[in-house]
Amino acid sequence: MRLGEETAEAGMPVSTEMRDALARLSRHYIPARYPDAHPAGSAASRYRASDATAAIADAEQALRFADDSWRSLGG
């Protein structure tokens, strides 16, 4: 989510769709880094193939957003 927040603070537009994708990706941060983050079991037991597919799609969207934002700055 921080990517979207800082981009918006810099005065660049961030769509609601992009903010939603970044929020969904942010939910994966702690469980991916800390496998014991869920007290009732491992994070692996809580993920399904559909979760992975959605996360990959959100990550691809975030990468396009970052690339497009960078290009708009002349980078």
Image: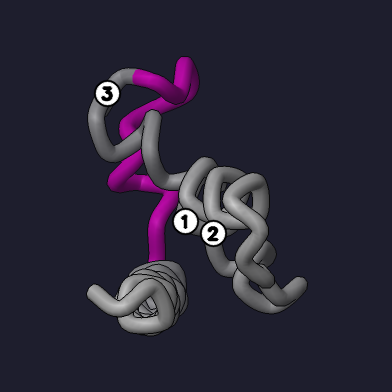
Kind of residue indicated by mark 2: Leu
Residue most extreme to the front: 74
Mark 3 vs mark 1: which is more N-terminal?
1
Q: Which quadrant would residue 60 be assigned to in this image?
A: bottom left
Kind of residue indicated by mark 1: Leu
Q: Which quadrant would residue 52 be assigned to in this image?
A: bottom left
Q: Which residue position is annotated with label 2?
A: 22
The answer to whether 67 appears left or right of 37 in the picture is left
Instruction: Give the CA separation, mark 2 to mark 1.
Output: 5 Å
Kind of residue indicated by mark 3: Tyr
Residue 65 in percent (x, y) is at: 43, 77
Q: Which of the two marks, 2 or 1, is nearer to us in this view?
A: 2
Q: Which residue position is annotated with label 3?
A: 34
What's the magenta region?
A: 37-48
Assign the C terminus to one quadrant of the image: bottom left
Q: Say whether residue 52 is magenta.
A: no
Looking at the image, can residue 55 be seen? yes
Mark 2 vs mark 3: which is more N-terminal?
2
Label ID, residue 16: none
36, 25: nearer the viewer: 25
Residue located 27% across and 23% down the image = 34
Instruction: Give the CA separation, mark 2 to mark 3.
Output: 20 Å
Q: Which residue position is annotated with label 1?
A: 25
| Residue 12 sits above or below residue 49 on the image | above
- Asked if the residue at tag 1 contacts the one at tag 3, i.e. Cβ–Cβ closer than 8 Å, the answer is no
